[in-house]
Image: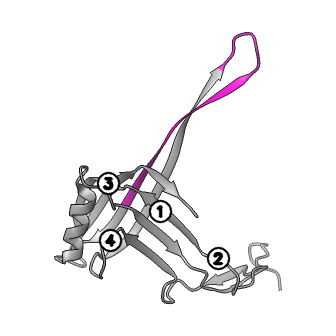
Amino acid sequence: MAEVFNRTQTVGGTFDPLSEGAVAVTFGDIQGPGLLVENIGVNYSQDLQRLYELGSNAVYFIAGRPAGEFTLGKIASPTDVASSFMTNYGDPCSYANSDIKLTASNKWCKFVGVDPVSAQGVSYTLKQALITRLGITMASKDMLIGENIGGMFVSLEQP
């Protein structure tokens, strides 16, 4: 039988994000459940300027400083953890331990060309993150208060 859209596909791998420890977000020293994070987005960029030399085809790049931004979607909760998060990441004078770490382990069920036992996970650390904005939403379908948090960070590390 021919494929309806004339496309050939094969499964390249399977990842089990629901297994314990597969994916995690940690916020400095803040411990315990109750932060209720639903999603996080990270952007890290550096400014590059082009410099052109008169009378030449040469192009030069001038590298600027890198800068990072993050967005975080969570459900508002009255826990100590949520209060600690806003205090630790909202005060620009107190950011000593305000890193955010994203990790995904090697919880591969199957991945073409990769031995699941030796496969390594991936992690990113947003160094010295600070909250710069807070948006609040509420929908009638679930009657929950959502928080859309935006922030910045100094550097992005990957081991």
Q: Is 60 one of the magenta-colored residues? A: yes
Residue to which mark 4 is pinned: 29
Task: Locate residue 21, reporting x and y percent.
Answer: 49, 85
Tag on residue 45?
A: none
**Mark 4 or 1 closer to N-term?**
4
**Mark 1 or 2 closer to N-term?**
2
10 Å neighbourhood of mark 3: few (<14), some, or many (≥20)? many
Q: Nearer the viewer, residue 103 or 36?
A: 103
Residue to which mark 3 is pinned: 130
Residue to which mark 2 is pinned: 120
Marks 4 and 2, how far apart at CA: 25 Å
- The reply to whether residue 139 is visible in this rendering is no
Residue under the image location 25 percent in, 55 percent down? 94
Residue under the image location 19 percent in, 78 percent down? 79
Marks 4 and 1, how far apart at CA: 14 Å
Dots 4, 2 in contact, CB < 8 A: no
Kind of residue indicated by mark 3: Leu
Q: Nearer the viewer, mark 4 or mark 1?
A: 4
- The reply to whether residue 7 is visible in this rendering is yes
Q: Nearer the viewer, mark 4 or mark 2?
A: 4
Dots 1, 2 in contact, CB < 8 A: no
Label 4 sits on a secondary structure element that is: loop
Dots 3, 2 in contact, CB < 8 A: no
**Mark 3 or 2 closer to N-term?**
2
Task: Locate residue 57, reporting x and y percent.
Answer: 76, 19
**Mark 4 or 2 closer to N-term?**
4
Q: Nearer the viewer, residue 42 or 106?
A: 106
Outermost residue on the top side: it is 55
Kind of residue indicated by mark 2: Gln
Q: Is 80 one of the magenta-colored residues? A: no
Magenta residues, as a range?
Answer: 52-71
